[in-house]
Amino acid sequence: MGSSPKSTLPQTIQPGNGTITKLSHTFSIAPMLDWSDHHCRFFWRLLTKQALLYTEMVTTGALIHGDRQRFLHFNEAEHPVALQLGGSEPADLARCAAWAQEWGYDEVNLNCGCPSDRVQSGMFGACLMARPQVVANAVRAMRDACSLPVTVKHRIGIDQMESYQEMLDFVGPVAEAGCEVFIVHARKAWLQGLSPRENREIPPLNYPWVYKLKADLPHLTIVINGGIQTLEECRGHLQHVDGVMIGREAYQNPWMLADVDHTLFTMDKPAQSRDDVLVALLPYVEQQLARGAQLNHITRHILGLYQGVPGARKFRRHLSENAYKKGAGLEVLLDAFALVRESNQPAPSSSAA
């Protein structure tokens, strides 16, 4: 087993040492089902020390009746990290919020934005926007059960909600219940007729409504989400709101995260390369393999690390074709690493005759 990977991370993000006084929402990475698991979040933390990371949505039913260890486990190096919950029953959400604090999360977030049929049938996700008092009751129960910040992620509206006032009518009661941070996906969600993927792309973005929400409710922390792809776009949004949440672009092009701390938090730009990040990941991979993890469950999250670099395709192909095989070990990742490094070696100069 390799040495502990926690040593590669600065103490400023470690919990319980008095260095974090207030959770920053300036930049965060969205909860993404099947993507933002604990392996992925550890990788992201090697790229940015300041971003707030979110888990995949975990339903209250999964925590109450399922494998709690599996769903709540995370590595200490991931801090600051928030647990996102899916549910609507106040008692169940309160119970899960208490577990979030017990397990050491830095925030607990309630999903009021997911439009999938599965979450609708369970009466949670985006459909909760039509029931602001239910959400308010849930927030009160969660706040009573833990001392963590309780936040809400939602859409600008659903189905026939056509006005800014209807979004305000949702936010108002939830804020009165004690929620101070609202993460707003700046698209409506159509709960009938569009798939979850289509709901991320087809309804038009409406950033001005999110800006107006911050202007009308300046005492709240408003974070904007949806369609944001570059750090320059983030800087533009931060002229109007308190924070930016980015999703798929961070997953597909993770190297962009290496500039987050310098660009958005005015920290010194770290002198690290993509190769340095992969080398820093190796002890973690070795440790996880020793614990029985499958290699592809880790490497699937790093396929985009070398995007735009010579050898990136060879790197992706080697991992995609070999990391899933039974017994695949660290050598598979090292071989992929060698392929991309070879592609970036200068060609040997020919000697004169």
Image: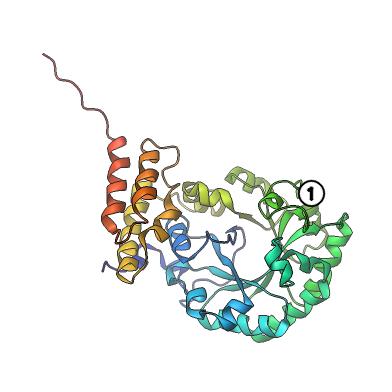
Viewer can see residue 271: no
Q: Position of residue 243 (x, y in %)?
A: 65, 57
Horizontal placement of 45 versus 156: left or right?
A: left
Q: Would you identify the image quadrant in which residue 301 lies?
A: bottom left
Q: Position of residue 67 (x, y in %)?
A: 51, 79
The one of 44 and 314 positioned closer to us in this rendering: 314
> Residue at image x 64%, y 47%?
228
Instruction: Report the number of discs.
Output: 1
Most extreme residue toward the top is: 353
Horizontal placement of 241 versus 263: left or right?
A: right
Q: Quadrant of the N terminus?
A: bottom left
> Residue at image x 37%, y 56%?
324
Viewer can see residue 317: yes
Amino acid type at mark 1: Pro
Q: Would you identify the image quadrant in which residue 93 lies?
A: bottom right
The one of 47 and 91 positioned closer to us in this rendering: 91
Circle 1 crowding by C-alpha within 10 Å: few under 14, some 14–19, many from 20: few
> Residue at image x 59%, y 62%?
31
Does 117 sit above or below residue 211? below
Q: Quadrant of the C terminus?
A: top left
Callout 1: SS:
helix
The one of 335 and 102 positioned closer to us in this rendering: 335
Most extreme residue toward the left is: 353
Does 344 sit above or below residue 38? above
Q: Position of residue 175 (x, y in %)?
A: 78, 72
Q: Would you identify the image quadrant in which residue 123 lies?
A: bottom right
* Color scheme of the displayed model: rainbow
Q: Position of residue 118 (x, y in %)?
A: 68, 66
The residue that disc 1 covers is 208
Does 213 sit above or below residue 77? above
